[in-house]
Amino acid sequence: MIESNFVYLSQERLTELEKELRDLKTNGRKDIAAKIAEARSHGDLSENAEYDAAKDEQAMFEMKINKLENLLSRVRVVDTAQFTKDKVHILSRVKVFNVKTKKEFVYEMVSPEEADFQTGKISVTSPIGQGLMGKSVGEIVKIRVPAGIIELKILSVE
């Protein structure tokens, strides 16, 4: 069972996120500080829209850092080599066939924080994710989604 408090990632994705955080804390903070200093040099801060915008940007930037730090504090690295290839699990790439529309889709099963339906990354806690988890190649799964019930046949699991 997947606990929603944890974020399950591959080692590769964890490394990418750690690199992004380091970059934000070093280069990103330097860039923001330079913008604030530049805006401050333009005079009276009480009427300086450029300064206000730079401070707002800094606040948003720090929120992004805090969010990333929070996410990384909850990471559990998953070694996908330990999973069998015949059942759907987190970080699986699943090829399915929609019985009604006669179309194939490929989904990557990810934690809610990484979900991006446009790129085929679906959360294991979404209706489709929950419906596919633990199922085997060849099974036809009926899943209730907001638009009704869909039937998906699992073609492959990687």
Image (cartoon, helix red, strand yellow):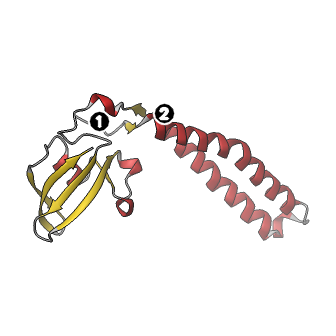
Residue 57 appears left or right of 75: right
Give the percent coordinates (x, y) of residue 130.
20, 48
Mark sitting earlier along the chain (2/1): 1
Residue at numbered disc 1? 3
Residue 128 appears left or right of 26: left
Give the percent coordinates (x, y) of residue 37.
85, 56
Give the percent coordinates (x, y) of residue 147.
17, 69
Q: Nearer the viewer, residue 30 or 23?
A: 23
- Mark 2 vs mark 1, CA separation in Å: 14 Å
Q: Quadrant of residue 35?
A: bottom right
Mark 2 closeness class: few <14, some 14–19, many ≥20 residues within 10 Å: few
Q: Amino acid at mark 2?
A: Ser
Quadrant of image for the C terminus = top left
Q: Residue at x 38, y 57 (%)?
A: 116
Q: Helix or strand or loop: what does disc 1 sit on?
A: loop
Task: Check the image and name the residue furthest to the top.
Answer: 82
Mark 1 closeness class: few <14, some 14–19, many ≥20 residues within 10 Å: few
Give the percent coordinates (x, y) of residue 66.
57, 43
Q: Residue at x 68, y 42 (%)?
A: 25
Residue at numbered disc 2? 73
